[in-house]
């Protein structure tokens, strides 16, 4: 059935003036309905906008509250821990082969890195640290790791207040970074000293210092410095061998498997770079 308004012309039931009044009434009613619809849409937009602002405020509060007290840092004080790696069965690394220390730094433990970097020939190739990219977790034979299979995405170098995925930190070692780890129970004054030590190092390629400083649960010494294939245990941030280790191995062509690779452009945001 078709519905509508019909007006008869000429000598119809409605006169011209009455028909005009009826059309005017219909137009006014239509305009009122349209006005109400527009007002309703405006209210909806205001409600959604307010909800969005409230949600953003809640997120901002959560981020600020979750930051460690006094974290500071070159990233505006906002730390983003690099994401963990995928699940599945862990890639269990074979025991790393220990070699004589020929670095000139007392206490350094050296491991077989033959073939990676390509110029390294310090031990049997079949027992050298592997260097494949793997998507899942890795169980390393050295704590903390000094190399081995690792995740294909590195993390941005710098200071982190929380433990980081080892599979990403090992990728940083491959790029020439030095990873300084410390026991979570280390006194705050010594943690601050390690962070100050990092900030004193020169800025290298891409605006990075190529130093990672992170806590590491289960560490065998209060502080451990690691590079690809080398490691040093110390008990104090003031141990002069810590600077010697950085000078020797940080982005050193002789010891860096992927010399020239970046320590930025990865994942995570450190407290200070």
Image (cartoon, rainbow, N blue to C red):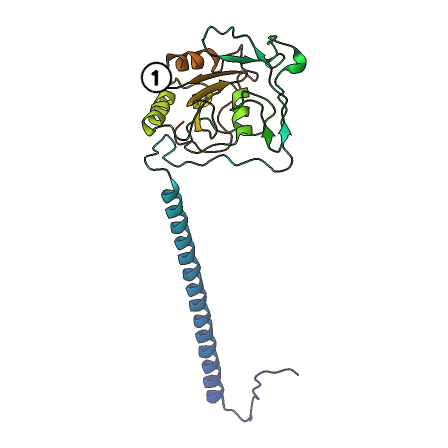
In the image, 90: left or right of 231? right
**Label 1: which secondary element:** loop
In the image, 100: left or right of 158? right
Looking at the picture, does residue 135 appear above or below residue 104? Answer: below
In x, y percent, where is residue 43? 42, 65
Q: Nearer the viewer, residue 38 or 46?
A: 46
Looking at the picture, does residue 187 appear above or below residue 176? Answer: below
- Residue under the point 42% across and 27% down: 183
Tell me the quadrant of the picture where the N terminus can be found.
Answer: bottom right
In x, y percent, where is residue 75? 39, 32
- Residue under the point 54% across and 24% down: 170
Q: Nearer the viewer, residue 71 or 19?
A: 71
Q: How many marks?
A: 1
The residue carrying pointer 1 sits among few (fewer than 14), some (14 to 19) or many (20 or more) residues within 10 Å by Cα, namely: few
In x, y percent, where is residue 228? 54, 17
- Residue under the point 55% across and 16% down: 229
In x, y percent, where is residue 273? 41, 27
Looking at the picture, does residue 267 appear above or below residue 246? Answer: below
Residue matched to label 1: 238
């Amino acid at each position: 059935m078709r519905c509508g308004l019909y007006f008869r012309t000429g000598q119809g039931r409605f006169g011209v003036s009455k028909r005009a009044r009826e059309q005017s009434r219909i137009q006014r009613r239509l305009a009122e309905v349209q006005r109400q619809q527009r007002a309703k849409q405006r209210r909806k937009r205001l409600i959604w906008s307010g909800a969005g602002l409230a949600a953003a405020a809640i997120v901002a509060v959560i981020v600020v509250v979750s930051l460690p007290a006094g974290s500071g840092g070159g990233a505006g004080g906002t730390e983003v821990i690099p994401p963990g790696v995928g699940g599945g069965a862990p890639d269990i690394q074979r025991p790393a082969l220990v070699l004589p220390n020929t670095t000139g730094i007392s206490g350094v433990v050296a491991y077989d890195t033959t073939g990676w970097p390509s110029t390294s020939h310090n031990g049997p190739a079949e027992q050298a640290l592997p260097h494949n990219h793997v998507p899942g977790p890795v169980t390393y034979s050295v704590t903390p790791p000094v190399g081995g299979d690792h995740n294909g995405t590195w993390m941005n170098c710098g200071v982190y207040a929380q433990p980081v995925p080892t599979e990403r930190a090992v990728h940083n070692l491959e790029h020439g970074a030095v990873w300084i780890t410390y026991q979570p129970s280390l006194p705050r004054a010594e943690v601050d000293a390690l962070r100050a030590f990092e900030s004193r190092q020169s800025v290298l390629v891409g605006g990075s210092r190529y130093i990672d400083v992170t806590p590491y649960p289960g560490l065998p010494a209060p502080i451990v410095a690691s590079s690809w294939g080398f490691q040093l245990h110390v008990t104090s941030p003031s141990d002069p061998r810590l600077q010697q280790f950085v000078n020797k191995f940080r982005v050193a062509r002789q010891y860096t498997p992927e010399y020239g690779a970046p320590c930025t452009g990865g994942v995570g945001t450190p407290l200070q770079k």
